[in-house]
Structure formats: C-alpha cells, structure tokens
C-alpha cells in the first residue's frame, strides 16, 4: 500500500488536483474553529474542497515543551482511494527568527498521518505516514495519501524547530485542505496569490467550477464587492428586511450584504430604486466603499501623488486615504486610473491590505 508520499515540491503543486475531485458545493473555507485542537479527540474535520486556516508555533507554549503546540485534523476515507493533502503558506507568517543563520529563518512542520484513531492516540509513528514540510513564504506542497482502511484518517501537525532558545519562533499561519486548491492561482510571484488564499481561508471569497477556479481576471461586480465587504465584517445580519431596490430579491446571495451596506452608508445604489448588482466596480468605487467602511477618515492636507485624481472628485479623499494606508499603490506612470474596471485579483488585494492595515489582522 502506498505510504504518505510527497508528489513534488514547487509552484506546479497548486494546479495539480487529484483525479476525480468531487466537491458537492462551491469552494468553502473557514478559520480553524477548534484551535487549540491539540489532542486527537479535538481533531478538526477537513471536508473535500474546504480550506482551513491553522496556526502553529506558539512561542510561550514552545518554551515550556516543544511538543505542546500541535494541531490535529481528520477526514473520512475509503480503502484504496487516494486523497490529496494540500499545505500552503502565507507570506511573512512562517518565519522563525535566527540571528546566526538566514537559512534557519523559517518554520518547519512535521506532518504525521494515521490510518485510524487507535494509532493516532497511541502515537504509533512507526505505523504512520511521516513527512517534513518547510514553511517558507508562499510555498505550496501537496502530498498523496492512499487510505489503508475505510474510516477516518488523522493528521498531526507539529513544529520541529529543535532549539527555540537559539532560533525563537513566531506563531505561524498555514492553510490545509483535502482535494481543494484553486488551479488558476498558482504563481507565488503574483501579487494576488497571498490575498486570494488568505481571504478564502477566512471565508470572504469563494471560487467557481466547484471550487477549482478563482478566476482572478474576471471583473468584480457590485454584488460580489458588497458581499466581500459584508463577509469581511463577519456577515452581520442587517436591521432591515426589505429594500427599495427593485433589481435584487431575497433569494440572491448578496441580498443581506446589500441591505447591510446601505445601512452602513457604504453604498446608496445607482439610483433610488436600482442597485445594479451585475455592474462592474471601478477602482474609484472600490476604494470609496472601503473608505466609507472605515468611517470616512479625514485626509487633511495629505499629498496627492496621482495626476488623474483631482480635488472635487467624489473619490478624492478615498483614494488619498487608501494610498496613505498602503491599500493602493497606483501605476508606474503616476496615475490611479479611477475609471478602470476592478478585477477580482485587485479586489482581493485591496481587501487583504484593508484587513492588514486597517483592521490589524492579515
């Protein structure tokens, strides 16, 4: 029987999905709800196509005992079937700090897989599937698991820096999934790579084609935009249950998001009776919505570095604010291109930076 084998390392890992991928619903994602899931009985269930955002390497715990901070996951198996475990990194969140050796400026995790609960509880690593994964910035790897039994497969993840006093560690984040990664978001050099997986792990954005594609080049619609903003705020229930907009209905996935956005003063629609859900968001509209969501902060006498953004433009304060907060950077020719269409890759990048620089998360 095949053991827990590393198929290969590198950029192509994200695009290679196990044959016969079966995901019943659209791509789903969630932050690990069971953290600290540090014993077998607390193992977090991995569902096919779902990405879970986990954490490892709590320094305070690690100083007490190297094995004290572990994560457990589990998923259902059918004997003889092969499953693909995907592990991916988020830039800047994986690093141990070494003053002596830059090659040690990373976090390494040890992954041990067990084909049943008894072996997992006994810690019978000699009967388990054991691999090492070096958590460098944006690294993706996948590992094929062929089930020896029909039942439940358990995965233990632990940090394996040998001496935290010499190489202190930070709490590090990673994503883990079974049979689920976007096959059109695979280049770690793309500026939208990290934002896409970060926001997917938080459940803010979702994909297409049963969760196999993100479609970063697609234009971001107004419906998608307000939905992303709403989810970033934990999908609050709006106070109102009805709307004057005649072009949206209660069965629309974005219905509550629109009602909430109106209540928060983030949008007023394209008219008193139209929201325009299928309309494409411009870059000016996008930063304006973010600025309003932040409470319309004043920009004072902040310098304007964009030659196509003028005082008097409805988006002037929003763009200057977003630029000052490092949410937007503009183009090399000194323009912002406010009327340009906002692609999904740009939207997730704006949202990621908003969450990082305004919410202090990310």
Image (spheres, rainbow, N blue to C red):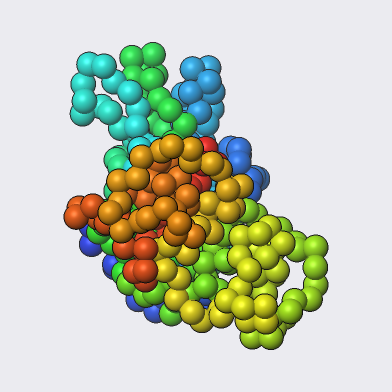
Q: Position of residue 15 (x, y in %)?
A: 29, 67
User: From this viewpoint, which residue is outermost toward the front?
Assistant: 312
In the shown orientation, is residue 110 left or right of residue 48?
Answer: left
Q: Is residue 347 visible?
A: yes
Along the viewing direction, whichever of 168 and 239 lies nearer the viewer: 239
User: From this viewpoint, which residue is outermost toward the bottom?
Assistant: 246
> Residue, x 42% and y 68% (percent of image)?
282
Q: Position of residue 198 (x, y in %)?
A: 45, 52
User: From this viewpoint, which residue is outermost toward the top?
Assistant: 165
Q: Is residue 127 visible?
A: no
Q: Taking 249 as reference, is 145 above or below it? A: above
The quadrant in which residue 5 appears is bottom left
Q: Taking 200 as reference, is 24 above or below it? A: below
- Report the quarter where the N terminus lies: bottom left
> Residue, x 68% and y 57% (percent of image)?
264
> Residue, x 36% and y 40% (percent of image)?
303
Q: Position of residue 123 (x, y in %)?
A: 51, 39
In the shown orientation, is residue 5 left or right of residue 356?
Answer: left
> Residue, x 33% and y 14% (percent of image)?
166
Number of callouts: 0
Q: Position of residue 160 (x, y in %)?
A: 38, 30
Along the viewing direction, whichever of 253 and 123 lies nearer the viewer: 253
Along the viewing direction, whichever of 164 and 98 lies nearer the viewer: 98
């Amino acid at each position: 029987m095949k053991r827990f084998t590393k198929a290969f390392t590198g950029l192509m890992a994200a695009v290679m999905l196990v044959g016969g991928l079966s995901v019943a619903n659209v791509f789903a994602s969630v932050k690990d709800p069971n953290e600290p899931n540090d014993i077998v009985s607390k193992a977090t269930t991995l569902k096919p196509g779902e990405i879970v955002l986990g954490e490892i390497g709590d320094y305070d715990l690690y100083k007490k005992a190297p094995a004290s901070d572990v994560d457990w996951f589990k998923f259902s198996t059918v004997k003889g079937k092969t499953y693909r475990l995907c592990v991916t990194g988020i830039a800047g969140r994986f690093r141990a700090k070494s003053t002596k050796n830059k090659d040690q400026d990373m976090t390494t995790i040890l992954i041990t897989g067990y084909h049943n609960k008894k072996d997992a509880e006994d810690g019978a690593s000699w009967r388990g599937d054991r691999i090492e994964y070096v958590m460098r910035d944006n690294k993706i790897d996948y590992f094929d698991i062929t089930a020896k039994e029909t039942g439940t497969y358990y995965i233990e993840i632990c940090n394996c820096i040998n001496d935290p006093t010499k190489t202190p560690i930070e709490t590090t984040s990673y994503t883990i999934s079974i049979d689920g990664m976007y096959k059109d978001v695979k280049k770690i050099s793309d500026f939208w790579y990290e934002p896409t997986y970060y926001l997917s792990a938080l459940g803010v954005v979702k994909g297409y084609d049963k969760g196999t594609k993100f479609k970063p080049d697609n234009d971001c619609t107004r419906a998608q935009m307000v939905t992303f903003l709403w989810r970033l705020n934990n999908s609050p229930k709006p106070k109102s249950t009805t709307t004057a907009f005649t072009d949206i209905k209660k069965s629309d996935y974005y219905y509550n998001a629109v009602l909430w956005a109106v209540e928060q003063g983030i949008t007023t629609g394209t008219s008193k009776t139209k929201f325009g859900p299928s309309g494409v968001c411009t870059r000016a509209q996008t930063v304006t919505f973010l600025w309003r969501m932040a409470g319309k902060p004043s920009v004072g006498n902040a310098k304007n570095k964009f030659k196509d953004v003028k005082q008097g433009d409805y988006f002037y304060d929003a763009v200057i604010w977003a630029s000052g907060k490092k949410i937007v950077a503009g183009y090399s020719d000194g323009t912002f291109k406010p009327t340009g269409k906002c692609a999904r890759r740009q939207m997730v990048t704006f949202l990621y930076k908003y969450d990082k620089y305004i919410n202090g998360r990310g």
